[in-house]
Amino acid sequence: MASVLKVDKLDPQSGTALEIGSSGDTITIPSGATFTQSGTMNASAITAGTFADARISESSVTQHVTAFDDNQIQNNIALLGFKTAVNGDLAKYNLVDQIVDEYEDATGIDAGNSTNESLVSGSYSGDLSPTHDADATGTDGDDTWYKWTDTASTGSFAPAAGGDYEVLVVAGGGGGGASDGGNLRASGGGGAGGYRTGTLTLTAQAYTVTVGAGGAGSSSGSNAAVKGGDSIFSTITSTGGGRGLGHSDAAGTTDSDGGSGGGGSWHITAGASGNEGSHTPVEGYDGGDGNNSHPSHGGGGGGGASAVGANSSTSTGGAGGAGTANSITGSSVTYAGGGGGAGSSTGAAGGSGGGGAGQSGTSNSSTAGTANTGGGGGGAADGADAGGNGGSGIVIIKGATPVETVGDLTLQSTDTTASTANPDYANMICLMENAAGTATLNTDIKGYISEDSGSTWTQGTFVDEGTWGTNKKIIAFHDLDISAQSGSSMCYKITTHNQSGSKETKIHATSIGWR
């Protein structure tokens, strides 16, 4: 039976149907039939079948669906998160399926799975710390210093990588001399330990550190004082301070020569020689002369690192030579002052930098040089009293260039549990700085995402997305496919490569998100 199509209206001129069917009727157009529509079609009335693309020309479509790029929104959220962390002094914190870490502290970093990570002033960079047994360490700006003060045994310092290091080496100060008693026969102050500084290029090997002990002061007129011990690091040797001359010393006594020379006495009036190691610049100066103007004797001051010891003025001892100030630790400290000479009426002060004071008659005692300054001991005027001991030396080493502290870094975050397991995509935004040189993205700095606590990693491709300061870049990757992984323990890893004194890459903040 033939199909019957109800025609409600016909064009009176052409006979073309104006209306087909009534409201609520279902009209089926056979496959292959031609249907021409010249008016407006109510799309909601089409309940089955499809229109071929060729039937609808692109030019006739006035609204198109376009892809939406949310990368800028992701970046802005991360940057706002970084600002919030700084302003609120926050550690790592979580948003919905996103974490933000401005590195206010190390809370968000997995130290066990990170290597060479060094957090300084809110940024991470690679740290190749030396192996050492220093007695104290500290920082001066971006550099780290290492200090040895113990004279009982040798120390050790082994850089992890070659580089330039600033070095201060001060030897032990010489002991102060003593008299034979009776007539207030004053003795000389001990010379300061040799003072030497320099910059050494060290390699990755162990270096021995030796700190010179202070020389013992003369215990009586019949016993000579003791010269200070040498301090040594690598190619730098500082000579121990010469002992202060006293009653028991004979002319030409060589142990009174030293880094700085010991002061002369009433018995041997000439001060001894400094700079025994013949260094340029000199490691110390000569001791001052004593006098034997009986019965008003005086001892000369021991030489210091920057001045000769003063000569005795009749019954007044000569002051110790001044030491030298040094700021290797970031604070100015004066080292290697000579010991003061004794006087039958007035003992002299030790030189600045730890020198001990000389004795005045029988009214006081000589004093020792200050420990770990290399100061010379003060001289004694009475045979019943001993000369002061010399102060022990010191060795300080500091990284003079970034070479000491810059190495390749692995920075892995702690885990964050995803709200939905097995996310398929992830993004990372980092604030990085080219502190030295310029890092090549995806060569010198790389980023990875894991959703199984670091068992599996997928590397993203960083792109440069702008600056946030001088030599500072916003780098990121978006929509990284991590669907091959499985889990909900989200973490990131950043690695730096080819780091050296001429290429230092710092990471200031990181944010990752996932979906």
Image (cartoon, rainbow, N blue to C red):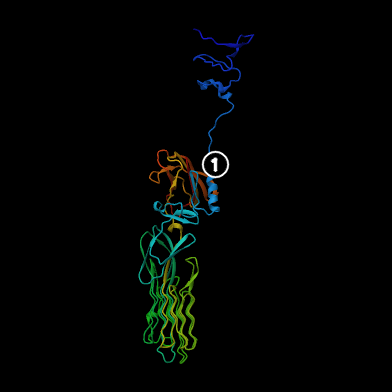
77 and 21: which one is in front?
A: 21
Q: Is residue 389 visible?
A: yes
243 and 284: which one is in front?
A: 243
The mark tally for this picture is 1
Q: Is residue 314 visible?
A: no
> Residue 83's x, y, as percent?
55, 50
Residue at the front extreme of this rendering: 24
> Residue 121's x, y, as percent?
50, 57
Examine the rendered structure and indicate whether residue 146 appears above or below residue 69: below
Examine the rendered structure and indicate whether residue 77 appears above or below residue 58: below
> Residue 133's x, y, as percent?
38, 65
Amino acid type indicated by mark 1: Ile
Residue at the top extreme of this rendering: 1
Residue at the right extreme of this rendering: 12
- In this picture, residue 72 sits left or right of residue 162: right
Q: Judge the density around disc 1: few (<14), some (14-19), many (≥20) Cα neighbours within 10 Å.
A: few
Residue at image mark 1: 73
Examine the rendered structure and indicate whether residue 360 appears above or below residue 162: below
Q: Quadrant of residue 36?
A: top right
19 and 347: which one is in front?
A: 19
> Residue 439's x, y, as percent?
47, 48
Describe the element under mark 1 as helix, strand or loop: helix
